[in-house]
Amino acid sequence: MGEVPCGFESHRPHMKKQNSLKIVPLGGLGEVGRNMMLLDYQGKILIIDMGFRLPEEDMPGIDYIVPNINCLKGKQKSILGLVFTHGHYDHIGAIPYLIGKIWQPNLEIFASPLTRGIILKRQEEFSSQPKLEIEEVKNGSKIKLGPFRIEFFKQNHNIPDNLGLFIETPVGNILHTSDFKFDSNPVNDLPTDFEKFKALSKRKILFLLSDSTGAEEEGHSLSEKEILENLEEIFKRSTGRIIAATFASLINRIQQIITLSEKYHRKVVIEGYSMKTNTELAKVLGYIKSKKGTLIKAKEISNYPDSRITILCTGAQGEGSAVLMRIANKEHPFIRLRRGDSVILSSSVIPGNERTVQILKDGILRQKAKVFHYKMMDIHAGGHAQQEELKEMIKIMRPKFFLPIHGQYSMLVSHAELARESGIPEKNIVVAENGQVINLNQKRIFVEKKTVPSNYVMVDGLGIGDVGEVVLRDRHMLARDGMFVIVAVVDKQTGQIKGSPDIISRGFVYLRESKELLAQTRKKVVEIVNRAAGSGGAVNWSYIKDEIRNKIGQFLYTKTQRRPIILPVVIEV
Ligand SMILES: [Zn+2]
């Protein structure tokens, strides 16, 4: 399978253009996060979302992973525009890292007011970014971009202002659900509008792309109202301070905590940069409501009794730099835990974070505070439809073709199974992964043989994509067995080593306790150099460095069963 750029039609200008739509997922299929997808009709490209994901555990030093957009290189002119479904970072987070690469004046971008606000606020943190003009769209807005007519419709999730996409294309109507759940009792939002869904389905849906994140969970997701009731139990019982930790982007959860605090006469302190900026933004745009005087500054905590205080902060995942971790580690300037405090961890634990969350919980309990987490009470509902809702969505939309999107591979497979159970024939369902090209026309759907590049692009500090497999492998080796630097000074005339080679080691052995090993190593280095270069004259130094690396590597391995990175440095004088 060869890799080709997307927008393939342009490669065969003489062939009759096929009447098919290509759907190219660049992220989010086979993983949670990094959602980005292209719709390509005869070389005209619509982009849906541009998210990032967090690194896997075995990626030391990596901040984020963003989609690979190499297939868009040189195709700026073919990009019709970008539409964003909602303001979660797994749907918008890669914008500052990627937008510059496809930037052109008058690039058309569409998002709901809250999503737009979050994108623009974040752009401020990055210098030298192009100035984005984002047009606001809402439930019912219609836009036309080339061959695509897009109609936005409201979807419930755990962030307000989430929009699904109904797209009329020359091959037929397609429906992209965005992340969603059905919610009859949402927070600051209208309940799911099933009438609207039915009206959309009457217009005949050829192709449904639906959120798979909850596809392995049985039953129905919790309503935001049920979560509120569970949270209220904690508010009823707590006599000391309540410290509630969640994600800064869970705007609904933030609202619930504020609402309950007001009901139980508590002032609310918001701690953490992202939590503060998101809350302020959502307040300005009217998505978070609070009474005058409810929100106070951290410094003012001591003006109120404990039973009148709620602290809302980040860090429910045990993130090292987040506020809750600093509180638990007694590093926060104003807030110390004490007996009577109730700490609420209101977000499900992301796979891989279980251990840090455990350490966090232990740390809080040692300081005699109580801990409430999602396993004990349903104080977090994922924002994603579960099996019953997913089946219902398929039954309402009755699409001819189906593609599960957004989720680990096992989630996509589960979702495909649900689609079969709901009556979609097997041959009309595609389980695809990032980089595959899905070819759709009125009659059939299939995955093309050719793929586009979709491998990880890693962000580390200011570097985007410069850290690749090789650098990561080195980081692993350094982390595992450390490094060993050998500095040999060689006389240019004689080719003999001058003095004794210097050895610097980090993370391999403690030098002071390894004198014998070091003495033997030095002796070996002298032998290697003198044998290879002993006669003086033209010397192949890179050969000698390789010799040192290999021979000393073997020697250290036989002595220690460890394989540090060996860096030979040869200085001619
Ligand atoms: Zn989401």
Image: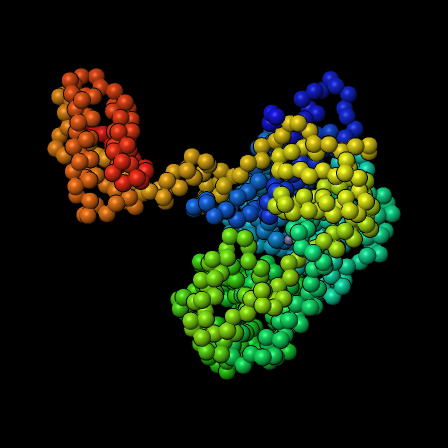
- Whether 132 is drawn above or below 312: the answer is above
Colour logic: rainbow
Query: Does residue 123 show up?
Result: yes
Image quarter of the N terminus:
top right
Q: Nearer the viewer, residue 563 or 90?
A: 563
Position of the C terminus by quadrant: top left
* Count of number-bearing discs: 0
Residue 273 visible in image:
no
Q: Residue furthest right?
A: 202
Q: How far across and how far down the image is residue 512, in percent?
A: 18, 47
Residue 211: % across, % down: 69, 49
Instruction: Identify which residue is drawn at 68% across, 51% down.
Output: 215
Which residue extends farthest bottom? 305
Quadrant of residue 505 in the image?
top left
Give residue 429's position: percent from left, percent from top: 75, 39
- Residue 140 horizontal side relative to residue 361, left or right: right
Task: Tell me which residue sits at (13%, 21%) in the image.
Answer: 494
Q: Is residue 134 left or right of residue 342?
A: right
Give 249 or 125, whichever is nearer the viewer. 249
**Residue 224 pos. (x, y %):** 68, 65
Q: Is residue 143 left or right of residue 74?
A: right
